[in-house]
Image (cartoon, helix red, strand yellow):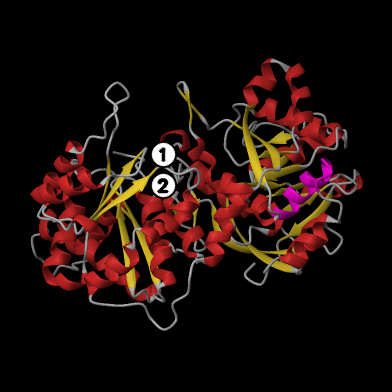
Amino acid sequence: MSGVGKGVAAASIGRVLQSKGYSVSAIKIDPYINIDAGTMNPIEHGEVFVTEDGDETDQDLGNYERFLNQNILSGNYMTTGRVYQSVIERERNLGYGGKCVEVVPHIPEEIISRIQAATKKTDAEIMLIEVGGTVGEYQNLLFLEAARMMKMHNFHDVLFILVSFLPIPSKVGEMKTKPTQYAIRTLNSAGIQPDFVLCRSARPLDDSRKQKIAVSGSMLPDHVMSAPDVDSIYEIPLNFEAEKIGEKILMQFGWGPKSGARDLDDWQELVRVSREAKEKVTIGIVGKYFRTGDFVLKDSYISVIEAVKHAAWFFGKNVDIQWLDSAVYEAEPGKLEELKSFDGIIVPGGFGSRGIDGKLATIRYVRENKIPFFGLCYGLQLATIEFARNVCGITRATSEEIDPDSKEKVIHIMPDQVENIEHSRYGSTMRLGAYPCVLNENSISFRAYGQKQISERHRHRYEVNNEYREKLEQGGLLLAGVSPDNRLVEIIEIPGHPFFVATQFHPEFKSRPITGHPLFNAFIAACMKKTKKIDDCPEKQVADGLQVESY
């Protein structure tokens, strides 16, 4: 089923294989006709993860980056739409030499070609390839056919892992293996025999059920592995290591651990802190992309959530994240008083006008009440608007995205984006990927990063209008980071506030579990200082403790 944990399973297996001394990378295959994830509604699909080279991808690439501690680029992501587009373009350019181009074999061959190209480019000894969706879906048939063809031509170099859910019906109380048996048979019908099965369930798998799945699935019993629910996804590599999945995969390939093998001590310490840290930092995230019917969809902000956790763990603390719907503050302004109970507030990225008044009210409240605030992308734009209205006296300040006809567009569209909007070119046309930023040496941001120039990932069409920069600075706003040509505002701060920082970029995309991200670490340090959980200067403590060279 969808959401069973294929992404974190692939990332965790990769982390284990890295510990055996192998270079590992990962590919995500999405069955959508969409060319990329950029035009998908985050409530429906989850977060859009942006790579260094500017691809808008599935959130699983974020898991790969965080677990493997490496950048995953656009060549490691493909969709049905992207594959078909390449084949059609090649046919139009006579790339097939006048042949009749058919779904089979040309689509599977394009899939295989992309896998091979990504493997070569990343110089990976082991490439993990996650096929999204489920084995029984029609839209996955061509990806499974490509997998079958790869196995046929490279029998000893390709193996298959099925991630399957074993339900425990509440009124029955017994773990059921039949759905997994059926899933194996369905995979067999596509010409694929799984080498391993990862059995996802609320509880660990027992030996009798392992044996039942092994017999019905024509597998070795010790290749049927337990993957029970855990409190933190970061526990999964340790669980897999306990199941010796790394050794078994290498044995299947006829390999063994390399001389550069290392243990998972740093990962074990990470998990220990996440389990044992009693003191918590309470963070409110004010958004609008987490309601889907009666349920809360946290995947819309998954990288933000993980970055907050990483930063809290960096200080040996845990975090309590609470979801705050900006629409509530629009309907009931008195509710803003509850913000005083939080150690810090984050306003993450987004688009459109819905819920904006609630976010602006939130930003004003935390600014005036000295509550640590961190704004991300749209969060910077809204913080600029709020400051312009309530500090600089630009009472009708707004964004061109919200009111295109306004005469006080403090936030306006980037000049090179105007034509894209006029011609409805929305896919892959925003300012995407990594861009440099020069920091003001008197800023919190400079002290957090510990260096003058950084590189961070972007995803936006609108920016601070330079016509208002002087007035904003006169009002006390610090332009803490700008582009090297001084054309774009990248970071704003309010000096004298415990922590009021907003970025036009998305720092959450570059956070790593072991070290955290400099700005998130500085934010959490300020939140801890607010509640007397830390007494030292947070910026210096963060800068002294971080490996910042990668930024």
In the image shown, does 80 or 525 lie closer to the viewer?
525
Crowd band around label 1 with a 10 angstrom C-alpha radius: few (<14), some (14–19), many (20+) = some
Outermost residue toward the front in this view: 207
Separation of residues labelled 2 and 1 (CA atoms)? 8 Å
Tell me if 464 is positioned left or right of 293 in this view. Answer: right
In the image shown, does 369 or 109 lie closer to the viewer?
369
Residue 536 visible in rendering: yes
**Mark 1 residue element:** helix
The x, y position of residue 243, in whole percent, is: 34, 58
Q: Which residue is mark 1?
A: 45
Q: Which mark is residue 37?
A: 2
Q: Give the extent of the magenta segment.
A: 521-533
What's the residue type where badge 2 is placed?
Ala
Residue, x 85% and y 37% (percent of image)? 370
**Mark 2 residue element:** loop
The x, y position of residue 426, in whole percent, is: 46, 45
Residue, x 69% and y 22% (percent of image)? 329
Q: Determine contact: label 2, label 1, CB under 8 Å.
A: yes
Q: Is residue 343 above or below residue 82?
A: above
Tell me if 247 is positioned left or right of 68 in this view. Answer: left
On the image, which quarter does residue 486 sit in?
bottom right
